[in-house]
C-alpha cells in the first residue's frame, strides 16, 4: 500500500486555527468561490483545486432591510386592507370620509417607503434616488 493511498482512505480530522478578523477576511477574498477550508488545504498541501459548482455564495441583498419590509407588511396588514378597498371600489360601495382618506394616504406613504427600502436592499436604487 502506497503512502498516497493510505492518506486518502484515512478519516478526516479537524485542525483548528485561530485567525483575527483581517486575516479571515483576507483568506476569504483569496478563496473566491472556494470554501475557506478547501482553499487553505489547497494552499498548504500545494493542490490545484477548482471550485465546486454547488458552493453557496453570499446573498447580494440586505437581509435586514428586507426583514424590515416584511415586518412592516405584517404589522400594518396593508395588502389585505388595499384588497378590501379595491373590492369596495369595484362594487361601488366605497364610502370615503376623512378617516378613510387619511388611512389611504398613510397606506400609500407606507408602500412608497417599502418600495424605496426594497430597491435599496436589492441594489437597484441608492438612497438619493439615483440608480446604481
Image (tube, grey):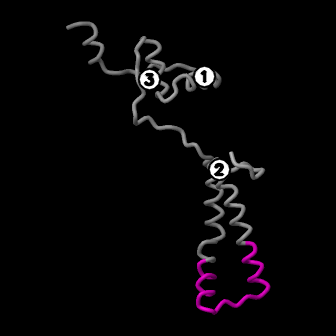
- Badge 2 marks a residue whose secondary structure is loop
Residue 7 lies in what quarter of the image? Answer: top left
In the depicted structure, whether residue 14 falls above or below residue 121? above
Of callouts 3 and 1, which one flags the residue occurring earlier in the amino acid sequence?
1
Main SS of the magenta part reads helix
Image quarter of residue 69: bottom right
Closer to the N terminus: mark 1 or mark 2?
1
Mark number, residue 124: 2
| SS assignment at label 1 | helix
Residue lying at 62% horizontally and 49% vertically, measured from the top left: 122
**Coordinates of residue 105 in the picture (x, y in percent):** 75, 75
Horizontal side, residue 62 vs residue 2: left or right: right
Single out the mark in the foreground, 2 or 3: 2
Q: Is residue 86 magenta?
A: yes
Residue 14: x percent and y percent? 42, 22
Q: Which residue is mark 3?
A: 38
Assign the C terminus to one quadrant of the image.
Answer: top right
Does 15 appear above or below 72?
above
Which residue corresponds to the image point at 49% horizontal and 30% vertical from the top-left?
Answer: 33
Q: Residues within 10 Å of mark 1 (few under 14, many from 20)?
A: few
Q: Is residue 32 left or right of residue 108?
A: left
Disc 3 crowd rating (10 Å Cα; few below 14, some 14-19, many 20+) is: some
Alpha-carbon distance for marks 3 and 1? 15 Å
Q: Residue at image x 65%, y 50%?
A: 124
Instruction: Identify the magenta region.
Output: 83-106
Image: 99 above or below 28: below
Amino acid at each position: 500500500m502506497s503512502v498516497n493511498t493510505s492518506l486518502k482512505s484515512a478519516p478526516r480530522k479537524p485542525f483548528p486555527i485561530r485567525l483575527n478578523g483581517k486575516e479571515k477576511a483576507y483568506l476569504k477574498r483569496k478563496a473566491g468561490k472556494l470554501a475557506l477550508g478547501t482553499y487553505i488545504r489547497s494552499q498548504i498541501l500545494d493542490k490545484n483545486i477548482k471550485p465546486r459548482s454547488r458552493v453557496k455564495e453570499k446573498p447580494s441583498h440586505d437581509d435586514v432591510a428586507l426583514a424590515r419590509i416584511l415586518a412592516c407588511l405584517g404589522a400594518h396588514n396593508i395588502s389585505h386592507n388595499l384588497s378590501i378597498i379595491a373590492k369596495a371600489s369595484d362594487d361601488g360601495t366605497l364610502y370615503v370620509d376623512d378617516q378613510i382618506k387619511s388611512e389611504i394616504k398613510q397606506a400609500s406613504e407606507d408602500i412608497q417607503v417599502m418600495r424605496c427600502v426594497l430597491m435599496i436592499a436589492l441594489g437597484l436604487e441608492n438612497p438619493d434616488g439615483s440608480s446604481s
